[in-house]
Amino acid sequence: MSFGQQGGPQSQWDPWKPHSQQPWNDGGDGRTPDWAALAEASETRNKRRRLLFIGGGAVATIAIGTAVAMAVVSANGDSEASGNPSNLPASASIPSSSASAPSFAPTSAPPPLDPKDFIASKAKDTAPLSATTLFPGTQLTMGSTVYKKGPTADTKDCTSVTQGTLPKVLKSNGCTRFLRVTYVKDGIGVTVGVAVFDTEAQATRAKGQTDKKGLIKSLFGKGVKPFCNAAICRSTTNSYGRYAYFTIAGHFSGKDVTQKDTAVFKVGDDLAEFTFRQIRRRGEAQASAAANG
């Protein structure tokens, strides 16, 4: 059996060349493969593959090294930027450690008007004034006690409705008007008198100069019998703003008032308190009107 090549020259097989012929004849001539050639080709192929792996590893190493270097540069850059203010952009600014917080103008509302200012002088106390505006209605209630309203009076002659040492005190301090009203309760009558001055100082001085002998005259009529004409009665004196106010209280029966006569004392105290409240309300009303106007 011949082992010669048939069918033309035999081509050399190259494992890296496409379509190259294997180093054996597949024509069915029965020849065995050239094992030496196959081994040599396999060794050559393995060497090339190792070279590629080595080269690829070098490229990967270079890539990893580059990434690590970039990460180090980035980390160093952030650290330097955060630790060194000079690395900030020119448009950035760092507040000084001594800088103070901004201040703002106050926005609180102005203080409310003081009602007493409107009853402290004639110049500001301009609301209508009369015995009926200061003591309105036909009765008043203090707590659970109801007092029936009697007659009222209004005069510019302050000395004509007062007695004892009071006329002189009122005149010397410039009293310009005197208002009176009477209330009754269970056989007891009480007259309230309000002296009007131009200033608070005049009213305060008149109050301070009034003694136990300075009294107002009781007001009666229109169903109210005379009282406190000859008997001993209880009197009070006080002032608020440009007003000085007085009370005189006693029994319609004509008997004298004593220290144990608590009913008369209560009537006088209630009406003195009510008069103070009415004068204060007068100031409050004018202060409110001024604030809303």
Image (tube, grey):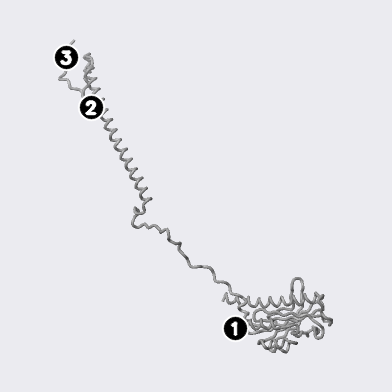
Of pointers 3 and 1, the one earlier in the residue sequence: 3
- Report how far apart the C-alphas of labels 3 and 2 lie in the structure: 26 Å
- Note whether 173 is above or below 58 in the view shown: below
- Report how far apart the C-alphas of labels 1 and 2 lie in the structure: 121 Å
| SS category of the residue bearing label 1 | loop
Q: Quadrant of the N terminus?
A: top left
The residue singled out by tag 2 in the image is: 16
**Residue 79 in picture, x, y percent from top left:** 37, 48
- Quadrant of the rendered image containing residue 120: bottom right
Of pointers 1 and 2, the one earlier in the residue sequence: 2
Q: Quadrant of the C terminus?
A: bottom right
The residue singled out by tag 1 in the image is: 123
**Residue 56 in picture, x, y percent from top left:** 28, 33
**Residue 107 in picture, x, y percent from top left:** 51, 68
| SS category of the residue bearing label 3 | loop
The residue singled out by tag 3 in the image is: 4
